[in-house]
Amino acid sequence: MDLYEYQGKELFRGFGIPTSEGRVATTAAEARAAAEEIGGQVVVKAQVLTGGRGKAGGIKLADDPEDAERKAEEILGLDIRGHVVRRLWIEQASEIAKEYYLSVTFDRGAKKALFMLTTEGGVEIEEVAAQSPDALARLHVDPLEGFQPYQARRLIYGAGIDDPDEQKQILDIVGKLYRCFVETDAMLCEINPLIVTPDGEVRALDSKFTVDDNALYKHAEIAELRDLEAYPPEERAAREKGVTYVKLDGEVGILGNGAGLVMSTLDVIALAGGRPANFCDLGGGGDAQGVVDALEVITADPQVKSIFFNIFAGLTRCDEVARGILQALSQMSIEHPIVVRLDGTNAEEGREILSGAAPANLHVEPTMLEAARRAVELAA
Ligand code: GDP
Ligand code: MN
């Protein structure tokens, strides 16, 4: 789960990492009021779950409350790479002497947390890594050994930060960021830029924060931060119904039972010359409600032109799945052509049930490849 900048900063603050004072606003009038409360120059910042907002015109300095209102009007509603701005963060403006970059994430290969620090912050870290890899200091932290302050010193010297006052503050921030990362079950905590003000004060000016979805049950207060409106309707529906759903880019909607079968279904669609629009995993079952939920999610995606329903019945039975499909189709109206492949336990019976009673838009095919070809053909 990705957090908005201001949510990440709130967590940072909770762990003692210095940030600037600010307020959330959803209208231009609220932005003006926020700027009045904060006083002086403010930054009006688009809150969207994507980076590079500055370059896209989503971050603007404002001299006074009227100016903040104007800038808010310009930024609200802006489309930043498919993310429409509906929230703003109004923050006390900082004077910037230097922009650094600090992050901690997982290095899955090393099975350790990985810190990265560079004095070349502000820009995309990929650019720094590509153009001046030596400027990027890295440090692994062993999860059993835990974080040791001497390690942070190595990171800071490695990045070439030589001002003792900065070293001290960054050392402190690195330690706190590690605690924040571990205790929130984060997968990424990134501060870009980590600024140094002209007075030598170090502060987090931005946050990119991703928390492990699988750990959210331990963090109710973080789970609550999820902004459902930021998700496309079918992803919202999938979340609400507890359907495993992944959005892709093609035209064929895919429904299967079991992750392995679904993965091979994606391959066979590609083999047949098509592209999957998305996929739903029904898991072990194939009961009517599960099928209804999955079909509702899949058909809410406007890119779907046909649906490939691929079932291999091991623990479930094809006749049961077939009844589930019919019951589901009687409960909802679907215009899309649906191609069904049933195999495994009671496959014959299942196919008979379907071909006897199925509506005209439902096609039964005997093999996975034939079904994939048909689904691709019908999507064209
Ligand atoms: P991003 O573009 O999505 O990464 O958004 P950031 O929050 O990192 O802001 C982008 C850039 O805007 C920063 O790198 C800064 O150069 C600039 N910026 C953001 N806040 C301030 C501020 O308070 N004062 C000044 N002078 N510049 C700021
Ligand atoms: Mn940034």
Image: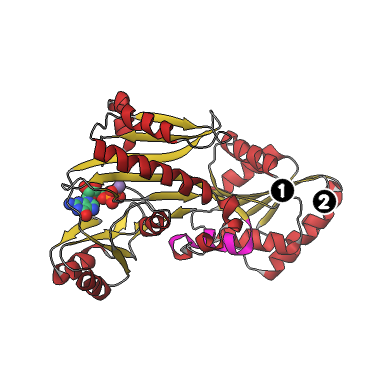
On the question of residue 121 being in view, the answer is: no
239 to the left or right of 2: right
Mark 2 and mark 1: Cα distance apart in space: 10 Å
Mark 2: C-beta under 8 Å from nearest atom of ligand 1 = no
142 and 44: which is toward the camera = 142
The residue shown at (31%, 30%) is 159
Q: Position of residue 300 (x, y in %)?
A: 54, 61
Q: What number is the disc on residue 257?
A: 1
On the question of residue 148 being in view, the answer is: yes
Q: Position of residue 212 (x, y in %)?
A: 54, 49
Task: Report the magenta residues as a range.
Answer: 230-243
Q: Which residue is mark 2?
A: 316
The reply to whether callout 2 and callout 1 are in contact (CB within 8 Å) is: yes
Kind of element beneath mark 1: loop
Whether 174 is among the magenta residues is: no
Q: Amino acid at mark 2?
A: Thr
Q: Position of residue 336 (x, y in %)?
A: 59, 58
